[in-house]
Amino acid sequence: MKKITTPLTDAVVKDLKAGDSVLITGIIYTGRDSAHKRLIDALNAKEPMPVDLKGQIIYYVGPAPAKPGYPIGPAGPTTSERMDPYTPALLEYGMKGMIGKGNRTPEVLDALKKYTGVYFAAVGGAAALIAKRIKKCETVAYDDLGPEAVMKLTVEDFPVVVVNDCYGNDLYEEGMKKYRKS
Amino acid sequence: MKEIKYQDIVEAVAKLCIDANCLIGDDIVDAFKSGLKIEESQTGKDILNQLIENVEISKNEMIPACQDTGTAVVFLQIGSGVKIVGGELFDAINAGVAKGYTEGYLRKSIVSDPLRRKNTGNNTPAVIHTEIVPGDELKITVAPKGGGSENMSEVKMLTPAAGWEGIKKFAVDRVMRSKANPCPPILVGVGIGGNFEKVAYLAKKALLRDIGSVHPDPFYAEKEKELLEEINKTGIGPQGFGGRVTALAVFIESYPCHIASMPAAVNINCHAARHKTAVL
Ligand code: SF4
């Protein structure tokens, strides 16, 4: 089990290999389709970014509402492929990591190598457990998007697994090959 | 004629929505535990343990096990001797869904139009399936269904010549292409027969069974076992990280069909397999 803290440096990213179980502590940001579209529009228009994503991790999540007394509702990962078209530009900008579930496009995997980034998966459906590792949650951009707004999460020992590292390794491919029969 | 009150249906449906999402069945937890015995991958075992802990937290705190609390799919068995008083049946179902999703802090994931995509704000309307049966009871099953696994489902119009081998190939291939997206370990509902629209319904209905229940027809019971073994040879494993436990169960539902056709449907369900029933 490796422990890392955000923001991530290239040295930290280079130390992560596909298959590693990792616990993340620090700040991570949330973002889904609509927020990604706006971030990319801001980048293209050379407008200032509403949050500084350099060195940071984006978590693809759409939590359930929080019960009174909870910082956040159940918050497991959503399917990453919907964010694929926006991801290479964000990695080029300086974002270092993403947390989601499911395969990424070859363009994203190339960008991970080129810009030294990492793609983690959180356990899909383990939303109640994951929420326990989120200590604080505040909306920091695109308030009008409601549950799709960008939120700043303070996490402690947030459990993930490295799927794609910056060397081109892919846990989904390699893991399946290893256990495939016939 | 037995009279059933509108408000009683509303309350029952609201409770079923909350319970289905927060009280995952013991059959699922037992299947995670049996999975631990056969899983060879350490990461796979870690995940199964996390899923067991997740269900515990969800139950103890009455919070949803998964944040995607789904489309509210409602199956109704309406006794022919039942009369609803005080309002319309479908209105009562939708009012119950709205109440359950709001008061239970469940996520509202429904948009009013597939292209214009505005959230309805209370997870209505439900997808409602009805069946008229003899008797004077109303049986309501609420089966919330997540988007990630639903998106990995498919209908295929096979020819009779394709036979069981064709169905097996279609189902295994569907699972292979789904990989990590439906959050494996998964449950696989397979519909065979009927026609184009009926077969999708069969596959969905198959998912209402509990893990461990044996198909009443030994022919299909055997097929379910065979298909489960095939799927678990893919190596996809828990969360697609590689391993033995890709699926926890396969359920088949069949129906007579036309001499020229053999429709097949695969409805993938995730381990957050939710369904709760009440009888009024
Ligand atoms: S596929 Fe199932 S377990 Fe995974 S996020 Fe969707 S509802 Fe939850």
Image (cartoon, coloured by chain):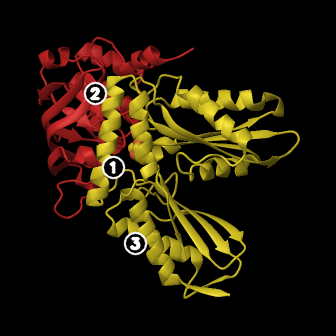
Amino acid type at mark 1: Val
State the separation of the CA atoms marked 1 and 2: 20 Å
Label 3 marks a residue whose chain is B
Mark 2, Cα crowd under 10 Å, few <14 / some 14-19 / many 20+, is many
Label 1 marks a residue whose chain is B
B125 in relation to A109, above or below: below
Q: Which chain is red?
A: A
Observer-nearest of B38 and B266: B38
Amino acid type at mark 3: Lys
Mark 3, Cα crowd under 10 Å, few <14 / some 14-19 / many 20+, is many
Amino acid type at mark 2: Val
The quarter of the rendering in which ligand 1 is drawn is top left
Chain B takes which shade in the image? yellow
Query: Residue under circle 1?
Result: B55
What residue sits 34% from the left and 55% below the top?
Answer: B64
Give the quarter of the figure containing the C terminus of chain B.
Answer: bottom right
Residue A161's disc is 2
Q: Is residue A62 visible?
A: no
Q: Does mark 3's beta carbon lie closer than 8 Å to ligand 1?
A: no
Please report whichever mark, 1 or 3, sits nearer to the chain's N-terminal start: 1
What residue sits 46% from the left and 38% below the top?
Answer: B182
State the separation of the CA atoms marked 3 and 2: 37 Å
What residue sits 74% from the left and 39% below the top?
Answer: B219
Query: Residue under circle 3?
Result: B99
Task: Answer whether labels 3 and 2 touch (C-beta < 8 Å).
Answer: no
Q: Secondary structure at mark 1?
A: helix
